[in-house]
Amino acid sequence: MTGSEPSKARTAPRISEVLATTAQEALEAKILRDVRQSPVPRHLAIIMDGNRRFARANGLLAVEGHLKGKDKLEELLNWCLEIGLRVLTVYALSTENFSRPPEEITQLMDLFAESFRKIGDDPRVHRHHIRVRAIGNLSRLRPDVQEAIRYAEERTQGYVEYFYNIAIAYGGREEILQAIRSIATDVRQGRLTPEEIDESTVSRRLYTQDLPDPDLVLRTSGEERISNFLLWQVAYSELYFSDVMWPGLRKLDFLRAIRVYQRRQRRYGT
């Protein structure tokens, strides 16, 4: 073996990695050009699944998986802005997630309190006039998380260019039940008759009352379920399931999901 051979062995993987990265970036650029030539979804909803499995697969603690997931969400916001996607709703914490170990819930609450404060100060949010809102049963959250949510919402309440919704302590059935209770109260008090109740009556009482229904629902991690997410709103949404765990989602994966949506012919149940 010559003296130069060990050096070659060490540099070869690096060269292959550079080539792979260059090829991926070229493909991303091509798909991005294709995506920009057709209408993008007005409203994208994402079930961000797989933080804990990603952590286990990479020898990390569960909280580290959630941190990686938070970082990925910050990346995703850039991708959405790049293609002009105006409404983004992400599933951050379901009502069922409260059954997880208390230590993990505490870590998640710490993460949410920090993240909402950060998004309220994010220069991108103010530069692009993004309205930030949390949707769900917010009374179940820690007081400091509720305060951080108020901070982000108040700082962005006048923005109407883009909409960024974080579903937290959220359950689709609970949301519909809340709408039903509101309608029942109005009927009992004579403000509404049963004959006047229609789809718009229900839609106006949901957390997403002033937003279009999602055009596309993207779920990561390989699971193919809606998992109690926006049950009323996704009646006619296109569904796209990705095998990658949420923290491992690449821009290329995101753009492919958008391109698949653009190639579908939406039939709205017909």
Image (spheres, rainbow, N blue to C red):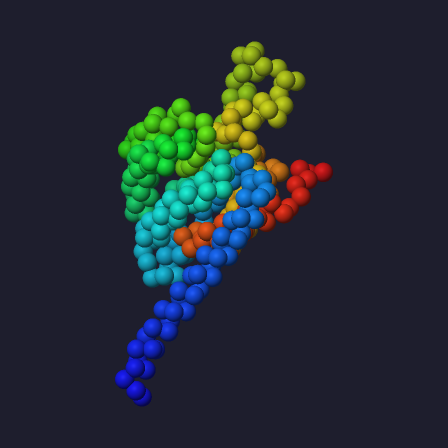
Residue plotted at (41% across, 27% down): 159
Q: Position of residue 247 (x, y in %)?
A: 40, 52
Q: Position of residue 124 (x, y in %)?
A: 36, 37
Q: Position of residue 181 (x, y in %)?
A: 52, 23
Residue plotted at (56% across, 11% down): 190
Instruction: Give the residue at the far bottom of this rendering.
Output: 1
Residue plotted at (33% across, 44% down): 108
Residue 245 visible to an observer of this rendering: no
Could you tell me how many numbered marks the image carries?
0
Viewer-nearest residue: 171 or 21: 21
Residue plotted at (43% across, 65% down): 19
For the N terminus, the quadrant is bottom left
Residue 98 visible to an observer of this rendering: yes
In the image, is 226 to the left or to the right of 59? right
Viewer-nearest residue: 147 or 190: 147
Residue 45 versus residue 247 in the image, above or below: above
Q: Position of residue 262 (x, y in %)?
A: 60, 45
In the image, is 10 to the left or to the right of 240? left
Instruction: Give the residue at the far top of this rendering.
Output: 190
Residue 199 versus residue 168 in the image, above or below: above
For the C terminus, the quadrant is top right
In the image, is 151 to the left or to the right of 232? left
Instruction: Give the residue at the far right of this rendering.
Output: 270
Residue 78 versus residue 192 in the image, above or below: below
Viewer-nearest residue: 66 or 97: 66
Residue 187 versus residue 262 in the image, above or below: above
